[in-house]
Image (cartoon, rainbow, N blue to C red):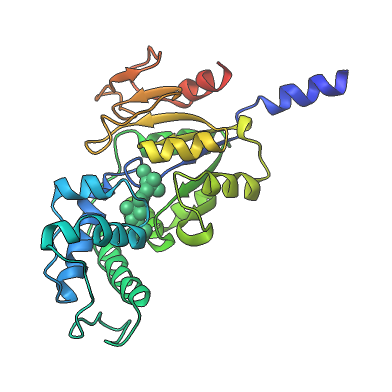
Amino acid sequence: MRFEWIEKSFMSQLEALIFDVDGTLADTERDGHLVAFNMAFEEAGLDWHWSVELYGKLLVVTGGKERIGYYLSDFYPHERGKPFSKPESVTVTGSVSSDTSFDEFVAGLHAAKTRFYTQLMAEGAVPLRPGVNRLFQEALAAHLRLAIATTTTPANVTALLTHTLGADSIDWFEVIAAGDVVPAKKPAPDIYTYALEKMHLKAEQCLAFEDSHNGILSSHGADLKTIITVNDYTRDHDFTGAALVLSDFGEPDQPMTVLSGSCDEPYFTLATARKIHQT
Ligand code: XBP
Ligand code: MG
């Protein structure tokens, strides 16, 4: 009986915060990924150009390679009147030659996109969103464990963290679960389940931070209580079941807006996180 009680109270402690990256830590979709996709298309000699609006539709599918496939299957034929077939003249610098298969072609295009994306991060193209670093610092000071669960390529996470917080920041995260490490990307729960397994933690010991419908489907699929910060692409998404939906984490001089759920504080702190975890 006593053992059960001890186990229960231990289980209810908040041990870790698990963060999505794209759209949650920074507005990387519009200002990073989209720009890099278009640069890769141009370098490959393709006459594709994704607008900010079209990219919003393409975000329904997570993962860059998968997103290119979705564009070609669901958008390209309508734009052009016939399906895409890779022209012989198209090559992607340093990665594929003209006789490669379609999958290799997409992989090469995507590798070029990652190269452009990491360059953009190195140029400081995308800052962190309000309150992100403040929350990291609070969590680190309190010896809370941090992890990342994202669909994007690991090199992109490293580039964003390094160029916004410094190279040492990579070590703040016990697990960086990213990209193809799991076969099924968000909205599947696999990337969160993977992070939990690596940390030897149960869902009830953690909180997840997301920005999108696919993201919350994934975190909820892994039974994680989830806090949302929206952005221009995700403001109207369905966040049913979210513990809290916020404009952003806010700062002392830049209060957040609470869009759904209950929170009296002007900006999101670790104390807020602990309260939410207990409710
Ligand atoms: C992020 C994504 C990623 C990026 C592209 O979703 O969908 O695919 O847009 O990254 P989430 P790659 O924020 O839910 O993790 O091109 O490296 O795949
Ligand atoms: Mg996201």
Q: Is residue 162 left or right of residue 92?
A: right
Looking at the picture, does residue 115 appear above or below residue 61?
below
Image point (23%, 46%), residue name: 57
Residue occupying the point 46% across, 52% down? 185
Residue at horizontal 29 percent and vertical 87 percent from the top? 97
Percent x, y of residue 36: 22, 62
Q: Is residue 42 left or right of residue 102?
A: left
- Asked if residue 5 is positioned above or below residue 141 in the image, the reply reads above
Q: Quadrant of residue 91?
A: bottom left
Image quarter in which the C terminus is found: top right
Q: Nearer the viewer, residue 216 or 125?
A: 216
Q: Judge whether residue 21 can be spotted in this image.
A: no
Q: Is residue 258 above or below residue 146?
A: above
* Residue 39 visible here: yes
Tell me which corner region of the image, top left, top right, bottom left or bottom right, holds residue 248.
top left
Q: Is residue 104 above or below residue 28?
A: below
Residue at image x 51%, y 53%? 177
Residue sitting farthest toward the front? 82
Closest to the observer, 60 or 6 = 60
Q: Is residue 49 left or right of residue 98?
A: left
Q: How many marks?
A: 0
The residue at the far right in this view is 1
* Residue 103 % position (x, y): 37, 73
Ligand 2 resides in the quarter of the picture at: top left
The image position of residue 43, as x and y in percent, is 17, 75
Residue 1 at what x, y percent from top left? 88, 18
